[in-house]
Image (cartoon, rainbow, N blue to C red):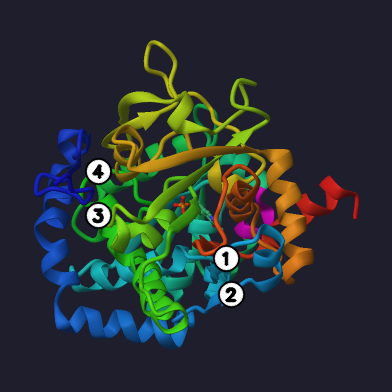
Amino acid sequence: MENFNINKDGFYGDFGGAFIPEMLQPNIDELQKNYLKITESTDFKKEFNKLLTDYVGRPTPLYFAKRLSNKYKTKIYLKREDLCHTGAHKINNTIGQIILAKKLGKKRIIAETGAGQHGVATATVCALMGIECVVYMGEIDISRQAPNVARMKMLGAKVRSATSGSRTLKDATNEAIRDWIANPIDTHYIIGSVVGPHPYPDMVARFQSVIGYETKKQLLEMEQTDKPTHVIACVGGGSNAAGLFYPFLNDLDVEIVCVEAAGKGVNSGESAATSILGTEGIIHGSKTLLMQTQDGQITEPYSISAGLDYPGIGPMHANLFKSNRGKFISIDDDDAMKWGLMLSQIEGIIPAIETSHAFAVLEKMDFNRDDIIIFNCSGRGDKDLDTYINYFKL
Ligand SMILES: *Cc1c(COP(=O)(O)O)cnc(C)c1O
């Protein structure tokens, strides 16, 4: 039978691996050799689970959305990652990586961030552990995302501006990699999604898999089955989706739905629908699908939600796409905004705009009355209020 997990060489089907400059080899070797040994140890699990409980606020509720279910004549549950400390699922991963870094004897953390959400989640866990934190961010993103820059500074992190190229996420990533090459012994690089060279995609998916495993347990209590019919999540790099899907990857009777950001429309030239627009190539050390020109230059993606405008998708998702295991749907800005407002008014939950994209599939797919649909409610909308206000002229 086909297996949708990672194989021992770090690949999901044709995708993944570690395509890195030679100077990064020692850093990646160290992680590849140690990540499972450490994260599977009793010691690690104890510390990780305790922090997820006491600090992050897990388990997050699995909430039956009654009014939404009535409206769409099916059973809809929301996995409430928006209730995590710092407002989204990203903290599950940064908690895991900071404990790993400590156990590897690292004294310093670096990260890169686009919208600033991963930067905030990283600065948070560095403050928690008392470890030095440097976050690279494109000069343009620094000016676009001022509140998150302030949060990172408030938490004690240093924010360094990437001033080359397009001065956005990919340039910040280049700076972070340069830093890591220069500081291989004492520094750990916390990547924020299921992207990057092996073992990052697998490591981050495992940390986020708490979302899916909790869902199974909670569903069993509420529906007397631990298998939904559909699991649905938005996909930027793919970490909240990977976390929800993880325990269901090889349950072929559970339909996996990935929702990408179409931006101003898939063919508008301003989009982030990577599975449709992307071709095979290498980005951030991993073989996957990415948006690129014919001569292999990365295309700048666009979405109204800063968390979804990444030019690639993680290798797990590239494989879900190519193998048809996952259904991929892309939702444009206007639809996403409409659904952000809809969820706010029908359930009293203001979602992050990333998350709003996922809900729009309720009008793109047909569901039966006794289907059990799980939406990953990846984050809360506080950070997006200005965007909602300007869009709806509230
Ligand atoms: C960052 C972010 C995403 C996108 O990242 P993934 O790795 O694809 O999960 C989605 N939702 C929220 C709320 C985010 O902050």
Q: Amino acid at mark 3?
A: Asn
Q: Which mark is residue 197?
A: 4
Sequence order check: which comes first, mark 3 or mark 4?
Answer: 4
Gap in angstroms between the C-alphas marked 1 and 3: 22 Å
Q: Residue at x 59, y 69 (%)?
A: 154
Q: Is residue 177 left or right of residue 362?
A: left
Q: Position of residue 258 (x, y in %)?
A: 46, 46
Q: Nearer the viewer, residue 179 or 281?
A: 281
Q: Residue at x 35, y 61 (%)?
A: 109
Describe the element under mark 2 as helix, strand or loop. strand
Residues in magenta, as a range: 145-149
Q: Nearer the viewer, residue 127 or 302?
A: 302
**In which image quadrant can residue 15 be found?**
top left
Q: Could you tell me which quadrant the C terminus lies in?
A: bottom right
Gap in angstroms between the C-alphas marked 4 and 2: 37 Å
Residue at mark 3: 250
Residue at mark 2: 64
Q: Is residue 192 visible?
A: no
Q: Amino acid at mark 1?
A: Ile
> Looking at the image, is mark 3 or mark 4 nearer the viewer?
3
> Looking at the image, is mark 4 or mark 2 nearer the viewer?
2
Q: Which mark is residue 76?
A: 1
Residues at badges 1 and 2 in contact (C-beta under 8 Å)? yes
